[in-house]
Image (cartoon, rainbow, N blue to C red):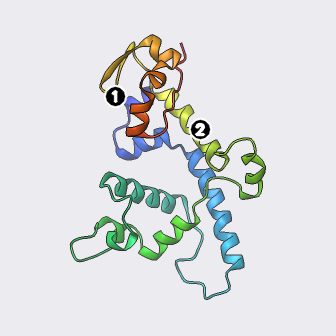
Amino acid sequence: MDEAKNANTPHDAFSLFISDDILNIILTHTYQKIHDYLFNFTGKIQKWMRRTSMDELGAAIGLLIYGGVFESSHEHIEPLYKMDGTGRLIFPVAMAKNRFRFLLSMIRFDDKATRTERRLEDKMAAFLKIWDMFIGLCKSLYLVASAVLMNNYFHSEEDMDSGNICRKNQASMESKFGRCVTVPRNT
């Protein structure tokens, strides 16, 4: 948890939850998707149709986060790149529109060759390894105190340990936040 106390920049904070190991998995499978796409592509290959790097992947993820911060998640790419004062200036400065669109269509989180087999065991197979790594990082960085304010209610340590928060407030929480997930505390 000292790492979290020493995170002084947005990049430091991001790296606590999305580790280099996670980014390497994404980069590896994105590389493979781009390779397969270009191998089977029959048209004229454009300059923005190329492999990516860790830095460029980080820039693309950063743009997605930036878009989320400004509630641009349901916007098309075109308005984000407008230069008439209505777009977001950071997008064209950070990455060309066609390149960003290409990377978004190519980004992958797992090995497609084994996905069908893994999906028989878990429907979340395409994202499961990264999800488990992310949850592990969250557990290592966050320690729940004896009472927690969640959904405008204080919850006791017993509620947190037993998972009663989800059961008590599941309907209201799911209507506001989506699926209710409980991560038990290690005591």
Specify the quadrant that holds the N terminus: top left
In the rendered structure, find residue 151 and report the number of the disc placed on it: 1
The residue tagged 2 is 133
Q: Position of residue 106 (x, y in %)?
A: 58, 66
In the rendered structure, find residue 13 and report the number of the disc placed on it: none
Q: Give the image quarter of residue 96.
A: bottom left
Residue at figure coordinates x 55%, y 46% from the top left? 20
Q: Position of residue 77 (x, y in %)?
A: 39, 70
Which of the pair 76/11 is nearer the observer?
A: 76
Which kind of residue does numbered mark 1 sit on? Answer: Asn
Q: Position of residue 82 (x, y in %)?
A: 29, 75
Q: Are marks 1 and 2 in contact (CB under 8 Å)?
A: no
Side of 156 where 99 appears, left or right: right
Nearer to us of marks 1 and 2 is: 1
Residue at figure coordinates x 66%, y 73% from the top left? 37
Position above or below: 16 against 186: below
Residue at figure coordinates x 53%, y 81% from the top left? 47
